[in-house]
Image (cartoon, rainbow, N blue to C red):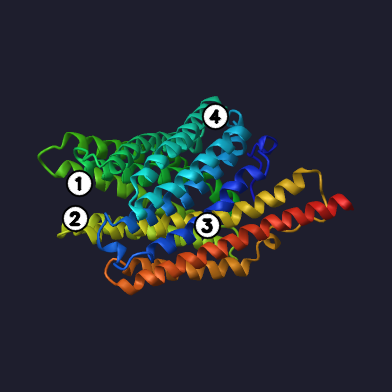
Amino acid sequence: MKTASLNTEQAPPISVPLRFFAVAPLFLSLAALILLSGADNPFSDTHMPALLAATHCITLGFMATIMVGAMQQILPVVIGSPMPGSRLTAWLIFLALVSGALLLPAGFVLEQPSLLNLAWPLLLLAFTTFIGASLISLARSPARNATRTALQLSVCALAVGLALGTLLAHGYATGTLLPDAGDLASAHVSLMLGGWVLLLIVGVSYQVVPMFQLTPNYPKWLTVTLAPAIFGSLLLNESLLLFRPESRWPAAVAQGMFWVLAGGFAVATLSVQSKRRRRVADATLSFFRLGMMALLFAVLLAITVPLFQATDRLEMLIVIVFLLGFAMSVMHGMLYKIIPFLVWFHLFRGGIKVGIPNMKEIIPERWMWRHLWLHRGTLLAALCAPWWGTAVWLLALGLLLQGALLGYALFTAISVYRRTLARLEQA
């Protein structure tokens, strides 16, 4: 494991990132229950309340809490610049984000505008605090590397996507029909998934993949150019949505650029992983590879679907593959590496040199393999859900079990940390 370049002395207390990670599995289980709440197939229409609610449970409750929690650790340790007022800032973001992530899906599924009107100001508070603190931290950072650039662009994409999401949530809550609401929703989704999620994963992968998976570094020409190129293609896409040229070709070319760049990241990651020094099978590596293959599948769909008569369900399939196949797979893989590392690191950092459990002893690897197979089955059910109602039940069961399994793994790691600390303090 390559840790020489890390600023470990600036790491926050272990409770700061772990509080975000610990609540994330609950939202997978909540999304599962919401998908089963209605009589109809929620995937039959992109505007179904249950689908909107479950999607935001996954994107806000699960993914955003993991990404925001990871940033609490990445900024001081990898970038060398902690957030201002890190503990207070973390608590403010955590409370507002979790509250808003609970209220927004509730407002959708119950069709209660009052809940939406409570949710969007809380989410706006959480994300504006996070964006402001992150940008200050990145501006102060002494690092001038590709990870810092990717994180900056990711946070900028989040800021614009947040503004659009706030407009849409306010319009939905008040019943005000916004002009070009469909284009605004498309821009919101592309900035949040293609900007905030993809660019953050790209930036973190530059550090995490070589460090934990013992691979060579990504090619320098790729790390320097990829994130700015992805961000530029997203800006071009959004400007074309705004100005609406008569010809469809500029928009098709801009979207094609984005997907080719995303596919390039997947190919580069699989390439460096194929050269890893250690050839032993690893569940976290398999999660990562599944995510990269899903991203390539999403690229294939995104490029070929417009050549035919695209339907809402085919376009929905692209989002499903990107969201559950790519982003969720990579986040599972990262969590199963980062959490044992945090437990081991904070015990070792406390001056304890003996009696610390090995990283593989903190979360049993057999649970990771079980989770991987469960996630593969859940993803297969998700691919069938837009056309087959029974698959929705299988998808919901998969999400429910994944939430339980990941939650068990997280609290196992926390209990190992507490037991080890107590035992060594008594000794």
Q: CA distance from mark 4 to mark 2?
A: 41 Å
Front position among marks 4 and 3: 3
From the image, tell me which residue sits under label 3: 26
Front position among marks 2 and 3: 3
Q: CA distance from mark 1 to mark 3?
A: 38 Å
From the image, tell me which residue sits under label 1: 252
Side of 287 relative to 2 (left or right): left
Q: Where's residue 140, x and y in %? A: 55, 25
Q: Where's residue 326, x and y in %? A: 41, 56
Q: Are marks 1 and 2 in contact (CB under 8 Å)?
A: yes
Q: CA distance from mark 1 to mark 2?
A: 8 Å
Does 85 appear above or below 105?
above
Q: Dot 2 lies on which element?
A: helix
What residue type is disc 3 on?
Leu
What residue type is disc 2 on?
Pro
Residue occupying image coordinates x 19% and y 59%: 311
From the image, tell me which residue sits under label 4: 137
What residue type is disc 4 on?
Ser
Q: Are marks 4 and 3 in contact (CB under 8 Å)?
A: no
Q: CA distance from mark 2 to mark 3?
A: 36 Å
Q: CA distance from mark 1 to mark 4?
A: 36 Å
Front position among marks 4 and 2: 4
Q: Earlier in the sequence, mark 1 or mark 4?
A: 4
122 or 312, which lies in front? 122
Front position among marks 1 and 3: 3
Side of 190 relative to 147 (left or right): left
Side of 242 relative to 119 (left or right): left
Image quadrant in which you'd find residue 282:
bottom right
Q: Residues within 10 Å of mark 1 (few under 14, many from 20)?
A: few
From the image, tell me which residue sits under label 2: 306
Q: Dot 4 lies on which element?
A: helix
